[in-house]
Image (cartoon, grey):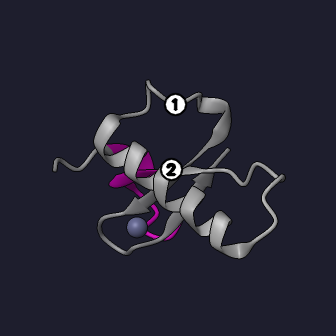
């Protein structure tokens, strides 16, 4: 499993750093149980890791960028 990283400015480090990119599916709003939500979250995560961003509509995903140095998380919608 290869990690996808991108260089972004880290507000915590104050410089550009490599960030691990994690694609997280946004809650779609129609699921009622927290269990369902968790499954959606996991499947979104797995798709992000294994299939890549192109098979899933980007509209459904949030990009979480995690600084490799300090762990600060940036969420892009
Ligand atoms: Zn940082």
Among the 4 quarters of the image, the one containing residue 59: top right
Image spot of residue 37 (x, y percent): 66, 64
How far apart are the alpha carbons under marks 1 and 2?
9 Å
Q: Residues within 10 Å of mark 2 (few under 14, many from 20)?
A: many
Q: Which mark is residue 22?
A: none
Please identify the quadrant where the C terminus is shown: top right
**Secondary structure under badge 2?**
helix
Is the stretch drawn in magenta largely helix, strand or loop? Answer: strand
Determine whether label 1 and label 2 are within 8 Å by CB: yes
Q: Which residue is mark 1?
A: 56
Earlier along the polypeptide chain: callout 1 or callout 2?
Answer: 2
Image spot of residue 39 (x, y percent): 55, 63
Residue located 34% across and 42% down the image: 6
Region rendered in magenta: 6-23
Q: Residue furthest left?
A: 1
Q: Which residue is mark 2?
A: 44
In the image: residue 68, left or right of residue 41: left
Image spot of residue 47 (x, y percent): 41, 44
* Residue 14: in magenta span: yes
**Secondary structure under badge 1?**
loop
Residue 50 vs residue 20, the one in the foreground? 50
Q: Residues within 10 Å of mark 1 (few under 14, many from 20)?
A: some
* Residue 36: in magenta span: no
Eyeballing the image, is 14 above or below 18? below
Residue located 30% across and 70% down the image: 69
Residue located 33% across and 48% down the image: 49
Residue located 46% across and 63% down the image: 14
Q: Is mark 2 within 8 Å of ligand 1?
A: no
């Amino acid at each position: 499993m290869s990690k996808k990283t991108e260089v972004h400015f880290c507000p915590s480090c104050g410089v550009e750093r490599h960030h691990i990119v994690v694609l997280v599916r946004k809650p779609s709003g129609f699921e009622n149980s927290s269990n369902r939500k968790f499954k959606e979250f996991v499947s979104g995560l797995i798709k992000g890791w294994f299939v890549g961003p192109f098979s899933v509509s980007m509209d459904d995903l949030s990009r979480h960028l995690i600084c490799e140095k300090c762990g600060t998380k940036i969420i892009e919608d």
